[in-house]
Amino acid sequence: MPRRTATLLASTLMLIALLCAGVLIPVPYSEMSPGPTVNTLGDHDGEPVLQISRRKTYPTTGHLNMTTVRVTGPDYHMNLFEAVYGWLDHDNAVVPHKTLYPEGQTAEQADQENAEEFSQSQESAKSSALSQLHVPFASQTVVGSVVKDKPADGRLHAGDVIKAVDGTEVKQAGDVAKLVTRHKPGGKVVFTIIPAKDAAAAEKQGKKPRTGAKQIAITTQKADDGRAIVGIQAGVDHIFPFPIDVKLADVGGPSAGLMFALGIVDKLTPGDMTGGKFVAGTGTIDDKGKVGPIGGISMKTVGARDKGAEFFLTPKENCAAAAKDTPQGLTLVKVGTIGDAVKALEKIRKGDTAGLPSCSPAARS
């Protein structure tokens, strides 16, 4: 065989081998890309995203869009070609797989975690919105979760209202652990609870449950640090004076909290918060209205601008990253609380955009 032909054949075989390797060999990376964006003031799949009943609501216009990031699933393994393409694509991001999915986490566990975070973000959105509007509501301490194979497993259940521990009234979630750890491991602690089903029935009427309390004695166990535990995580459940429902499927995580809260405020407030403008945004929110940072900020700004957004409400901790690569025509607005966001929307409605708190590079700290 002529030397030139042999060299060409060897090169061809090498190229085929590399192509096969690129397709067949998985790499430990996942991809993030701009996901759907949904107007919290509008409809999704034929029904309003925010549904408020037994309370006067007001017409709204414009957009208050929550934004999302689409990610490859925990069981999906990218090949080398996909990873390289993702690295070269300006709008996408390729990150180590473990950044999105901790080692050992299954797809079911990831879905469950995302669903729980999404549910909690809705509750915090409701409470922060009503607090912003000075609408009073009640709160109560509940069993947030029960650890499997611990003393409380099968005795207490998520959603049970904790009224007292050893006869001492529980006023906030932190009281539960303090009262339990007064015991030595092996001692008995008595919980006064209202079962979750009874509490849920009362909550539908916007009331705290007042009857049906039960006392349950549980023997404590020694934790790794020597404390007495029963194996529960206490949480807070809010009782709102009227129903507020979020109807949005196939979305997970906590980052839509701010936009849900603003949508609720707009629907419960006379007038028009956006002035008909297209505003999008992101950010977690807690019960007190503090806005927290999120992941994938650059992909969310791209997704928002592609849908027509003019302004993007950005958690202040995400400002520096968002300002590095802002889509043309999109104004980033820095917010730290729901109050900041409401004030910013007022400026947008009035056309006072020069006075908006900016996420420009000069504003980084």
Image: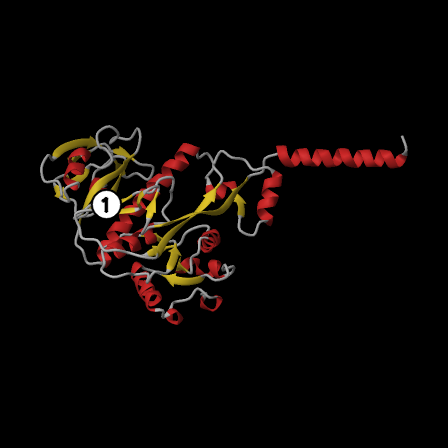
Q: Quadrant of the N terminus?
A: top right
> Residue shown at 86%/34% (left/top)?
5
Q: Is residue 219 shown left or right of residue 24? A: left
Q: In which quarter of the image is the C terminus?
A: bottom left
Toward the right, the furthest residue is 2
The vertical placement of 23 against 274, above or below, is above
Residue 33 appears in view: yes
* Residue type of the residue flagged with mark 1: Val
**Residue 214, image quadrant:** top left
SS at circle 1: strand
> Residue shown at 17%/41% (left/top)?
203
* Other-residue count near label 1 (Cα within 10 Å), few / some / many at <14 / 14–19 / ≥20: some
Question: At which x and y percent is residue 325?
Answer: 52, 59
The residue closer to the viewer here, 130 or 162, is: 130
Tell me, what colour scheme is on the image? secondary structure
Residue 288 appears in view: no
Question: At which x and y percent is residue 76?
Answer: 51, 35
Question: At which x and y percent is residue 112?
Answer: 36, 36
The residue closer to the viewer here, 123 or 182, is: 123
Number of numbered discs visible in the structure rendering: 1
The vertical placement of 183 against 294, above or below, is above
Toward the left, the furthest residue is 211
Q: Is residue 269 shown left or right of residue 349? A: left
Question: At which x and y percent is residue 282?
Answer: 39, 53
User: On the image, numbered disc 1 is attached to which residue?
Assistant: 236
> Residue shown at 32%/50% (left/top)?
42
